[in-house]
Amino acid sequence: MKTPLRIGLIGYGFMGRTHSNAYSQVSHFFDSSHVPLRQAVCGRDEEKVRAFAKKWGYASYETDWRKLVERNDIDAIDICTPNDSHAEIALACIANGKMILCEKPLALNGAQGEEMVAAVEKAGLPNLVWYNYRFLPAVTLAKNIVAAGELGRVFHYRANFLQDWTISADLPQGGAGLWRLDAAAAGSGVTGDLLAHCIDTARWLNGDIVSVSAMTETFIKERVHNLTGQKQAVTIDDACAFLARFANGSLAIFESTRYARGHKALYTFEINGEKKSLAWDLHDMNRLSYFDHGVPGDRRGWSSIHCSDGDHPYAGNWWVPGLCLGYEHSFVHGLAEFLKSLDDPAAEKRYPDFRHALGTQYVCDAVLEAARTKQWVDVKQA
Ligand code: SOE
């Protein structure tokens, strides 16, 4: 028997679209006794939210998120608003007994995240944070290889997330689309927005990060604020690089910027173990680069696994072998994992829940503190 999972989506920007696509696709490709229904979408601009509801097949709309979370025909709320409202909305969802799927990062900082984790765990409500990249077949294959112990002792982890969209000094901060430049709405710049992705993947693959040393820079010091029309100080980190130690003794280097001319969204990582190394690149997302030192010397070299065969994670649920998947599939897979755990709450969770995302938040907080104090900082563990 199928159980409907009536979704209420709050926010309908870029992430609202990726999640709506996942709700519409998942039941066609992944079996679960839970079937998401696009029950309602919420946004402040009535004309726009009505148009979004029509385009994406939501049965109704609201213009006040408080009304949405109080509706008794909604089972789960998807929070796709800017970061400064995640905690308030999540706490209201919990008070109203709703499951939560929250856009990353979990909150503005660890203190907010702790309150969210305590409340959601006390209420026993299923919860997910949409760190999506781990659900791409090549990244999940990397996880499976590492988890099987095939790398042996891990020595190094390195990751980059590079963009170039904020280089122009004329770009304003704040408001729709540009709240990521406004520290009040975003909490931080590239650390919470981009490095948080790298940290989620890194912690999933290689375990806890225990200490960090960091530097940040704000290249453009003032920008016009869309909400006030005034030039205001920019207080986000435009770029951040940090060194880290993992609990397993390996060393890491992470870098992110929105000032790497030519790079739109280049997320890469590499992990080096005593027996094998793995590397991945978002621009070639279906491939996992793989080096096996166990191969005879004259055949040894990096190989490139195209993760599109039935043997590869998630790929068998889609088309025939060899055909590619894309960015949008990562959200479908994350949702499929969430539905799987509703079917079987005892099964291993492959998705980041609030507690895991709090651990990532603690790393971000420690990175920003390390940059501020120019000291190594120990990372609080979730
Ligand atoms: C920023 O440009 C952004 O859209 C992030 O907010 C997303 O989380 C990332 O996946 C792509 O880049």
Image (cartoon, rainbow, N blue to C red):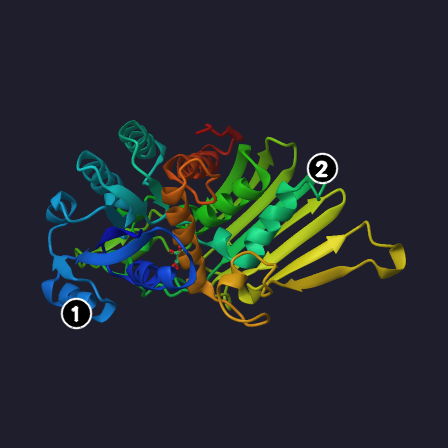
Mark 1, ligand 1, within 8 Å: the answer is no
The crowd level at tag 2 (other Cα within 10 Å; few <14, some 14-19, many 20+) is some
Give me the residue at 43% from left, 49% from top.
337
> Relative to 245, is 67 on the left or the right?
left
> Relative to 35, is 138 on the left or the right?
right
Q: Secondary structure at mark 1?
A: helix
Amino acid type indicated by mark 1: Ala
Q: Which residue is mark 1?
A: 51
Mark 2, ligand 1, within 8 Å: the answer is no
Please name whichever residue, 123 or 18, is drawn nearer the observer in this view of the structure.
123
Give me the residue at 14% from left, 66% from top.
50
Amino acid type indicated by mark 2: Arg
Q: Earlier in the sequence, mark 2 or mark 1?
A: 1
- Locate residue 364, reporting x and y percent: 44, 39
Q: Is residue 357 above or below residue 30?
A: above
Give the label on residue 153, or none.
2
- Locate residue 348, reporting x and y percent: 48, 39
Task: Classify the position of ligand 1 by quadrant: top left, top right, bottom left or bottom right.
Answer: bottom left
- Locate residue 27, reporting x and y percent: 36, 60
- Locate residue 3, reporting x and y percent: 28, 50
Residue 213 image-quadrant placement: top right
> Relative to 77, is 127 on the left or the right?
right
